[in-house]
Amino acid sequence: MTADPYLLRTLDTVDDFALVSDVLGAGFGEDMGDDSDGERLTFEPARDHVIEHAADGVVANAGAYTRELSVPGAVLPSAAHVTLVAVRPTHRRRGLLTRLMLHQLKDIREVRREPVALLWASEGRIYQRFGYGPAAGRLWIEADNRNVRLTRSVPPEVGRLRDAAPGDVHKELREVFERIRPDRPGWSGRTDDWWQRRLVDPESGRHGYTARRALLFEGPGGVDGYALWRRKGAWEAVGPKGEVDVVELVAATPEAYAVMWRLLFSVDLTRTVGYGFASVDEPLRHLVDEPRALNARALDSLWLRIVDLPAALAARRYAAPVDVVIEVTDGLLPDNAGRWRLSGDASGATCDRTTDAPDLTCDVTDLGAVYLGGTPLAALAAAGRVRETRPGALPVAATAFSWPRSPSALEIF
């Protein structure tokens, strides 16, 4: 017999981040060496698993962050934010990714006791194999500001705008973010380290844009919204063609939202406004006179995996009363498989094993897709992924799993 040349182990210290960076650079074809985005600030070596080859060293990696996660009607105190997944090109097709992902799922369930895991997928086809479903989408806006006008005006006495360096107003940014986060499914918690990472803005990563600025809206009671943004100057023969890049926009009131967008669409000498993290139900689409001119392109964002099924389904709230038996398959975590009775509403929920006949049948991937309220259960049924076994069960369950606000994410982790 030939000894296995591959050893799976967990990293020890933050200094091991250099090993991860090297693997990521090889896997994604990018130079990752200078940590320009501040990723080392949030790196968790105890959650980072590598595979070492006897001759070639570290050849594969999968990590995770420990962060809170807003879900419909509640906040999970801890969810696995899976990240830093890569395999060196010279060691692909040897089962290393599968080995890492299975080890990570076991760690999330048995050691971390986290009910769900989530990630941004480089390719969706990869992570569906491990039970992740597309749980949230986003709109990528690239608008020509000459063809878009905001239809709502806000009286000056409602509030005023203030410009600042982001680091100088960190406290105000954090306070507004925390006011809104519990009600926004898909948003992740930010500790001091995560805020520091979010505000990192090295010149090497600006690609011709200015340093980021913070735009704050101050209402009668204080700051009610902020936007992190930057601009790039450019010219053509007939005049200016500068760009505005909106990095993040958070508003606690409709007035703050409208006033900030009005300024961003009217910056002198610019022609394009871009925003890559708009929600699927972004209010901006209902504030402009020509929504098509936003050039909004639909993309996926968060993919979610149910790791502890009864804990996950009991943790969120439901838009309408529901009492349904779901028969679930899970080829990787057999403790999730079987029949479960979900009973819940807007005030709470329970999920317990049952021997009762199922009302619906599906795979755990489908439950991950609907968990944040962004993927309609009825759409999965129309695709043949969810099957109704008791007439009338589907519309009731579909309504319950929906939520008034579409899930979204403000950052790639």
Image (cartoon, rainbow, N blue to C red):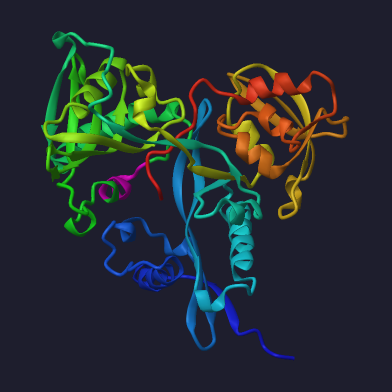
Magenta stretch holds residue 193: yes
Count of numbered circles on the image: 0
Q: Position of residue 336 (x, y in %)?
A: 73, 45
Rendered location of residue 41, percent (x, y)? 31, 57
Residue at coordinates 31% horizontally, 16% vertically from top-left? 254
Q: Position of residue 131 (x, y in %)?
A: 65, 49
Residue 370 visible in the shown view? yes
Q: Quadrant of residue 22?
A: bottom left
Judge from the rendering whether residue 222 lies leftward or rightward of residue 71; answer left or right: left
Q: Main secondary structure of the magenta part?
A: helix
Above or below, 55 against 121 in this view is below
Q: Quadrant for residue 218, please give it.
A: top left
* Side of 228 relative to 318 (left or right): left
Residue 214: x %, y % from top left:
18, 36
Residue 278 painted magenta: no
**Residue toward you, 65 or 146:** 146
- Taking the image as shown, residue 310 lies to the left or right of residue 246, namely right
- Nearer the observer, 379 or 347: 379
Q: Splitting the image into 4 quarters, where does residue 205 fall?
A: bottom left
Is residue 224 among the parts visible in the rendering? Answer: no
- Taking the spot 32% from the left edge, 48% from the top edge, the residue there is 194
Q: Residue furthest bottom?
A: 1
Magenta stretch? 190-196
Q: Quadrant of the N terminus?
A: bottom right
Q: Is residue 44 above or below residue 230?
A: below
- Residue at 51 percent across and 29 percent down: it is 74
Q: At 27% from the left edge and 17% from the top edge, which residue is drawn?
A: 150
